[in-house]
Amino acid sequence: MHKLKAVFWDVDGTIADTELCGHRVAFNLAFKDFDLDWNWNESQYLDLLKISGGFNRIIHYRNKIDSDLSDSQCSKIQARKRIHYKKLIQSGKIKVRDGVLRLINELYSSNIEQFIVTTSGRDSLEPFLKNSLSSQLSYFSGTITYEDVCRHKPFPDAYKLALKLSNQSKFNCIAIEDSAIGVEAAKAANLNCLLILPPWAS
């Protein structure tokens, strides 16, 4: 039996319900700032979660509805969305899921390395970590975000990079995910993966 030496944490839906109560709300506020009549309800957004990365979701939706927005305009919307997301985090409206802090603390006490592996951008991730995981920040050995790889989940690139940074065998690591594309990414990197139901599916 292989001993557990490293855990790779997804963030959105796994560590916290950042999706429906955070990212979705921030997107809609950004759309309003740009005078767009777009408004993603919960059902639409859950479907958009099949697309990895916020900018990619905007592009996907633009193409789907045949909008004439340029990639540059979509990028500006995404930048504005990040500002709204930070404000939501700072307001304390996004909570860490029950049991997550206990597990992070127990893994740290057992000398098991922990890494963040997410498709969120660093500008969105860092405010959340500083506000919601401030006491546990030093427990993580590394963070991999949208900017660190060219291909995002369900491609295995982020998890392959996590394995490289951890300097561990894939047999001694496990990923914790809440989505099908996350599990697919972990499996494509030949990692064992624990799937937990996101808050909106429980």
Image (cartoon, rainbow, N blue to C red):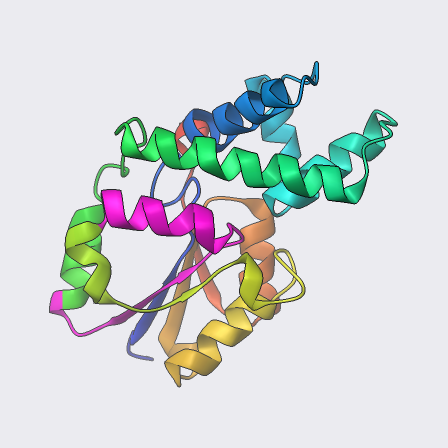
Q: In this view, does 57 lie above or below 107?
A: above
Q: Quadrant of residue 128?
A: top left
The quarter of the image holding the N terminus is bottom left
Q: Is residue 21 shown above or below 147?
A: above
Image location (x, y in percent) of residue 133: 23, 49
Q: Nearer the viewer, residue 148 or 171?
A: 148
Q: Residue at x 46, y 28 (%)?
A: 201
* 45 or 69: nearer the viewer: 69
4 sits left or right of 43 in the view: left
Is 79 one of the magenta-colored residues? no
Number of numbered markers? 0
**Start-end of magenta stretch:** 109-133
Q: Where is residue 97 in the image (x, y as percent from the top left)?
A: 28, 37
Frontmost residue, 67 versus 6: 67
Residue 140 percent coordinates (x, y): 27, 66
Image quarter (top left, top right, bottom left or bottom right) of the C terminus: top left
Q: Is residue 111 magenta?
A: yes
Q: Residue at x 64, y 56 (%)?
A: 154
Residue shown at 68% from the left, 18% from the top: 38
Q: In which quarter of the image is residue 7?
A: bottom left
Residue 66 in picture, x, y percent from top left: 88, 27
Is residue 149 in view from this perspective? Answer: yes
In the image shown, does 72 or 149 lie closer to the viewer?
Answer: 72
